[in-house]
Image (cartoon, rainbow, N blue to C red):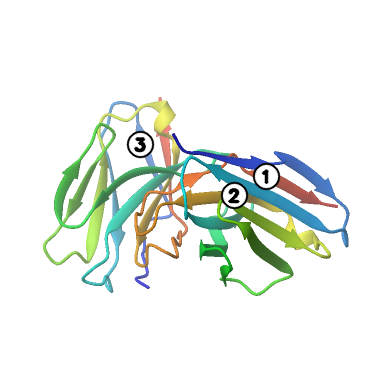
Amino acid sequence: SQTIHQWPATLVQPVGSPLSLECTVEGTSNPNLYWYRQAAGRGLQLLFYSVGIGQISSEVPQNLSASRPQDRQFILSSKKLLLSDSGFYLCAWKAGRSTEAFFGQGTRLTVV
Amino acid sequence: LAKTTQPISMDSYEGQEVNITCSHNNIATNDYITWYQQFPSQGPRFIIQGYKTKVTNEVASLFIPADRKSSTLSLPRVSLSDTAVYYCLVGDPDQLTFGGGTRVLVKP
């Protein structure tokens, strides 16, 4: 069966520090991969998605970047965090043109 | 990309049926309609998907009129544990864009 791993679960980082969140999927190949951010009490904001290795689509211009170094690995990064980067970050995967996505447990990031 | 409009919030009581309508006037011919449920501090969970008429599974029913410009998610006999945010998605399945969702509060 397919599983998605996302870590860490919580993170407290100072303003200006770098960020690296990792997401891996097991049990499938060539998944579509997604990074979302959710501010408190708000909806999900799609940050990046990837339909294949080397293919990253950015939805929101900001100080975040994403990379997909391996087929089932998706990394969200920042060189310098802002206070506004605080939120609940979710990674998700789905198969091809399917509309059923599976989400990781999320990372709650607090920038102080 | 089809834009969706849902009510911001709805209140209900245990045992009642909850119907959430999503408007998607610009839905494309090939678009499916998908609904997700999200509990606090968790990722969304797929509930149901449909293209036209009616779809039913063990969790919910989805009603889609002939013009497909709207859809209604029906949750039968809700319980307190159905308190969550419900999202309607329409459009490019690669982008998987969520709107604001509908916050459903089930009261005892």
Q: Which residue is mark 2?
A: A90
Q: Nearer the viewer, residue A98 or A108?
A: A98
The chain ID associated with circle 1 is A
Residue to which mark 1 is pinned: A107
Disc marking residue B12: 3
| Mark 2 crowdedness (10 Å alpha carbons): few <14, some 14-19, many ≥20 | many
User: Judging from the image, what secondary structure is the residue with disc 2 in?
Assistant: strand
Going by the image, does B29 lie left or right of B96? left
Q: Is residue A38 found left or right of A29 in the rendered image?
A: right
Same subunit, labels 3 and 2: the answer reads: no
Residue lying at 35% horizontally and 36% vertically, measured from the top left: B12
Determine whether B83 is above or below B24 in the image: above
The percent coordinates of residue A112 (x first, y second) are 86, 52
Whether residue B107 is visible to the viewer of this picture, yes or no, is no
As shown in the figure, which amino acid type bears the numbered disc 1? Thr
Please identify, in this view, whether the residue under mark 1 or under mark 3 is nearer the observer: 1
Indicate the quadrant containing the C terminus of chain B: top left, top right, bottom left or bottom right. Answer: top left
Q: Residues within 10 Å of mark 3 (few under 14, many from 20)?
A: some
Chain that bears disc 2: A
Amino acid carrying mark 2 in the image: Leu
Disc 1 from disc 3: Cα separation: 31 Å
Q: Chain of mark 3?
A: B
Residue B10 point in image, percent of width and height: 38, 45
Q: Quadrant of the N terminus of chain B?
A: bottom left
Q: Earlier in the sequence, mark 2 or mark 1?
A: 2
Do the residues under discs 2 and 1 have CB atoms within 8 angstroms?
yes
- In the image, B81 versus A97, the foreground residue is A97
Query: Residue B71, image x and y in percent?
Result: 24, 56
Please report the residue visible at 70 percent of the width from the left and 72 percent of the height from the top.
A62
Tell me if I can see residue B88 in this picture.
yes
